[in-house]
Each structure stands twice: as structure tokens, then as C-alpha cells.
Amino acid sequence: MHHVSSEGPRLVPYRATLDIPHELVEHVSWLIHARRCEGGTRWRKLGCFHQALLALVHLRKNETLPQLAAGFGISTATAWRYVDETFEVLASWGPGLQEALVGLGEGDFVIVDGTLIPIDRIAADEPYYSQKHRKHGMNVQVIARSDGTPLWFSRATPGRTHDLTAARAHGIVQACLTRQILVLADRAYQGAGATFRTPYYHHSEQPQHYQQFNRDHARLRSPGERAFAQLKTWRLLRRARCSTRRIGTAVQAVHTLLTCSYSG
């Protein structure tokens, strides 16, 4: 006679590869090691390297914490704690807005845009519903170089936040004005004034030079999509199942990882 376990199905661990450089895992493990030394942390179930690997698998593959826990031979609660700790460590190394703009000034231009990080929410959660994207999510603003390399990602705000409102709230408009940095942005930022340049409305009805301006504007802005493409190679940010608070920390953690990749 077969008995059905009251504990539910057991998870089976398996080996898999992760499509990131070994050096990046080592770098993250050194950051974790430094944090442990700073806090006087003693023995842990996982060493620094495997803790780093655990968090990077979660970010890159968006596997659930019970799946990760089974694969690494730890409890779900421990996996949660390790991931949270690693996100916090990485986020602490991300540049602030003013720091990100160092070296830029009059004569330079950047691309500013917003994206939505989709989340699991019900229709009643109105603050998180984006009319523009027709889904629930969190609004994240990016400042990118002219070649699309991300300079700075904002904290995450509820999805219904308008891009211009977010840019003002995060201090992007004022920071770029102070440094006299030209900003190329889409029509969502019309009204920002300052150093922002946005396309003309109804350009097909305007004189030829208006149409040419819009074409040139679109061409110069197009590399900005690369910043979001880089962000969302980390699959956790394609559809986040975590709390809205952790999404902002995850974005900052990924920014640090991207910075490591570019500098390496």
C-alpha cells in the first residue's frame, strides 16, 4: 500500500550552468566576504562564493526560492536571507545620481527613459497599474550614455507614476539642468523644460525641418533601449514575484553587476 506524504512533493536538485563570467561570481563573493568581516559574521551554511552564486542564479534565472534552496541544500528561509543580504551588498555599491553624472557637462548629452518592471498584482492594486503598459508593475527611470551604456537607475516607484513625474521626483531634471547636460527623451517628458529635448507632436504636418529633427532625435535616442535590454537579461526583472520593496534593491544590485561587467 502506498502512502501519500503529508509534506507534499520533495524537490529534486539538479546541476545547471549560469551564463555569466566566473570572475563576476568571484567579485560578488569578495563583496560578501568584506561585509561578513565587517559585521564579524561567523560560520555560515554556505561560503561566500556559493552565496553569491545563489543570488546570481535567482536574479539571472528567476527561479523560486524553494527551488534554489533545494538546489543548494539549504532551507527556504536561509535562501531568502542570503538573497536579501547579497542584494543589499550589491545595491550599496551602486552610484548615486550626482556620482553617475561626474565627468558630464555642457556639450554632452544623455538619454533618459522609463521602463516597467512587471509584477504579480491584482486589479485592485491601482497604484501599481500602468495605463501606458496595460499591466501592473514598477516604474524605473534610467540615464544612459549616448551609446546606451547605463549610468544610473532610479529606485522603483508604483507603475502608474508618469515618467515626467518620476524624473522630477528623482531629481533627474534638476541634476541635468545644474550640469547643463542635454537630455534626449520621448514625448512622455514634454514639459520638463530645462535641458530636455523631446520630439514634436504631429511632425508630419509640420515643416520639413521639424520632421528631420524628429528623425535625428529618434536615431540618437535609439541606443537607450540597450540599457533596458541589459537590465532585463536578469530575468527576475522581466516578471518580479518578490515584494515591491525588493524590486528597487534588485534593480540597484543589477546596476552594480552591469558596472562590474563594463569595467571588467
Image (cartoon, rainbow, N blue to C red):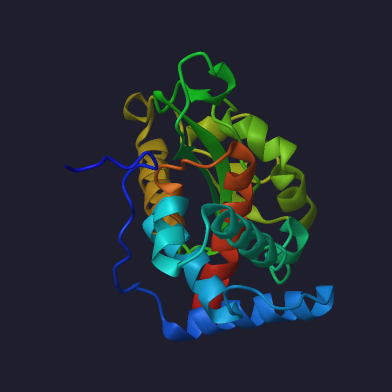
Whether residue 181 appears in this view of the structure is: yes
Q: Quadrant of residue 163?
A: top right
Q: Residue at x 77, y 75 (%)?
A: 41
Left or right of 175? Residue 257 is: left
Residue 178: x percent and y percent?
80, 52
Q: The N terminus appears in which quarter of the rendering?
A: top left
Residue 189's place in the image compared with 73, above or below, is above
- Location of residue 10 in the rendering, given as x and y in whole percent from the top left corner: 33, 52
Looking at the image, is 189 positioned above or below residue 152?
Answer: above
Compare residues 113 and 207 and report the one nearer the observer: 113
Residue depicted at x 47% and y 52%: 65
The answer to which image quadrant residue 87 occupies is bottom right
Q: Is residue 127 above or below residue 238?
A: above
Kindly identify the residue that appears in the image at 61 percent across and 41 percent down.
156
Image coordinates of residue 177 in percent, x first then y, are 75, 49
* Residue with the most extreme front position: 1
Image spot of residue 165 (x, y percent): 66, 30
Query: Position of 103 compared to 20: left or right?
Result: right
